Image: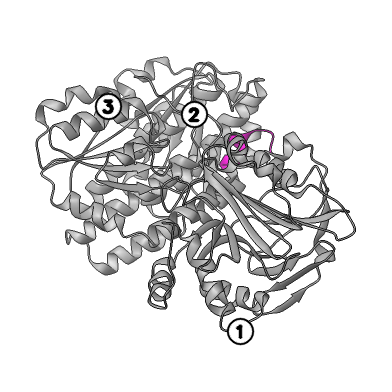
Amino acid sequence: MCGIIGVCTRVDKKLNTGDVVYKGLLRLEYRGYDSAGVASVEQGVLRVLKGKGKIADLEKRLGLSRVRGSVVIGHTRWATHGAPSDVNAHPHTDCTGTIAIVHNGIIENYRELKEELARRGHVFKSETDTEVVVHLIEEFYKSGDRPYDAFKKAVSMIRGSYAILVVFASAPNTIFFAKKDSPLVIGLGDAANFVASDIPAVLEYTRRVITLRDGWVGFVTGDSVFIEELGKGPVNPMEYVRVVEWSLESASKGGYSHFMLKEIHEQPRALVDTLYGLSSDPTLREASKVMAEARRVFITAAGTSYHATLHFAAALAKIAGALATPFVASEYEAYLPVVREGDVLIAVSQSGETMDTLKAARAFKERGAKLIAVSNVVDSAIPRESDIALYTRAGPEIGVAATKTFTTQALLLSFLALDYALLRGAILKSEYDEYARELSRASDLAAKSIAWSEGLAKKVSEMLRLKQSVYYLSRGVGLPTAMEGALKIKEIAYIHAEAYPAGESKHGPIALVEEGFPVVFVVPRDAYYEKVLLGNIQEMKARGAWIIGVAPEDTSLGEQFDVFFRVPSSHWLTTPITHTPPMQLLAYYTSTLKGLDPDKPRNLAKTVTVE
């Protein structure tokens, strides 16, 4: 997720456009912060300033706020294609240096477009998918199309997710825009009109906004707005104007009370972006080949990411009949004596900087193991030191407790297990396609799970906040998700929670169960696990436990639960995606009802850079 802002001034008004864009970028910096840049058009001349680093540092170095022009667009980047660098920073320009673009999202078919454009003589400067679009626009523009027509033709050829702003030196008071999946709003001001990826960027100047819909394209000038649905015709902008009542502070959270809640609700979007990224990246198959040639496969992580590794290990065993050894990163020394050349370590880290995971990766590499990194941050330490890097596309996560990074990690690792199984011949192509269809539903599944659970989570948290302890129980493929649920309630609500394989509960933990003791059962969509969990539920009920079930809507266990969080019925492989959101919401609302700040839990940091 990147931050975008553009401003077009009215001819009869004076506005410091550079300062407007600079302030807007600062307010969007939470969306991405590895590089930034601006492009301006003044008297028919296009000027671009950009570079790697935080916006405040770039202001000192480049003077972003001192840019002048009737039109200025700006961008703050969260890298997805290409490492953070001066050349990969947005805006990007065409071969002539007269067209500039900023973009949030992922262009799924950029490789084939890039190859065709290169054959036509276009020269690319960056590693990004975005640069392809501006060269595609140039191709149509130099063929004689007007700027807007060239822009529309280019947009019609790209696949993926995008919020795009484009300026032409030859159209000095116009910003062209297009939107699909990635957010984009228009702000209607007295002195100027604005286009931005989020409301905070424009809220100082106007509260009248239009939230753009998927498939809409158009342009703004200083005093006009034109919108059409691509291929269908014009849209009346005035029908979609609304007045925002948020404060600037609340708007930076998208109207949510905390970043954690915002990020829980961002999961469907993050899952779509991760799917787009996987579909356009051959690196997944490269990772599968390295695994297939390995003597042994290890996988390591810490905290929430460790739970994603457990899901991967379970999926690999069930789908591919293969063994991966998961371990907590800080315990890596216990595994070093058996590591040899020919082994593979998959190191999973949200930040790519987690110190115990990094040290484990380095120690395995020293012993000859190959490294596969899974991270949410392009060109962070662990990916840099690995042989292969796979990336989730969750965007920045501000809340300390991981939410969208867990579900996107589970999605990516599920696809890795699936691709490995296909490569090794453990499943047929038809079976692969069936699994892949289920995983491709991830965004819709998460959206339904959140919508179905939120109201109930608020009610249940009224009672849960009064409890001292809670168990999270499951079996097989549900256990890693149960562990993640227990971690969340500990992290942000400060309630003692333990996760166990349900069959283990009778070997000690059940001694603590008494009347009203809360027990959360995570029931995956698997007939075997549902059957065996019935006995475990009855054991707890017999001792007075308060049974909270997180289970598919069509489960036969519904009558056994005192509280039933229904989730969409789907394949067991999607369990982290369907079953985790209710437990995230339960932890969030329990925390806030206790008067705690879920974004900043005590004693914890977002990126743990010490052992």
Asked whether 267 or 103 is in front, the reply is 103
Q: Secondary structure at mark 1?
A: loop
Position of 537 with respect to 71 (left or right) is left
Residue at image coords 56%, 48%: 50
Residue at image coords 61%, 84%: 144
Q: Which residue is mark 3?
A: 359
* Circle on res. 144: 1
Q: Mark 1: give few (<14), some (14-19) or many (20+) Cα within 10 Å.
A: few
Position of 527 with respect to 387 (left or right) is right
Q: Mark 2: give few (<14), some (14-19) or many (20+) Cα within 10 Å.
A: many
Residue at image coords 43%, 54%: 81
Q: How is the image coloured?
A: one colour
* Circle on res. 588: none
Residue at image coords 51%, 72%: 136
Q: Which residues are magenta?
A: 256-264
Height in image: 259 above or below 206? Answer: above
Q: Does 63 lie within the magenta span?
A: no
Q: Secondary structure at mark 3?
A: helix
Q: Amino acid at mark 2?
A: Lys
Report the mark closest to the observer, 2 or 1: 1
Height in image: 486 above or below 564? Answer: above
Image quadrant where one finds the C terminus: top left
Q: Assess whether mark 1 and mark 2 are in contact (beta carbons under 8 angstroms).
A: no
Q: Which residue is mark 2?
A: 488
- x and y, in percent, of residue 168 in the image: 65, 67
Mark 2 or 3, nearer chain start: 3
- x and y, in percent, of residue 481 in the image: 41, 38
Mark 3 or 1, nearer chain start: 1
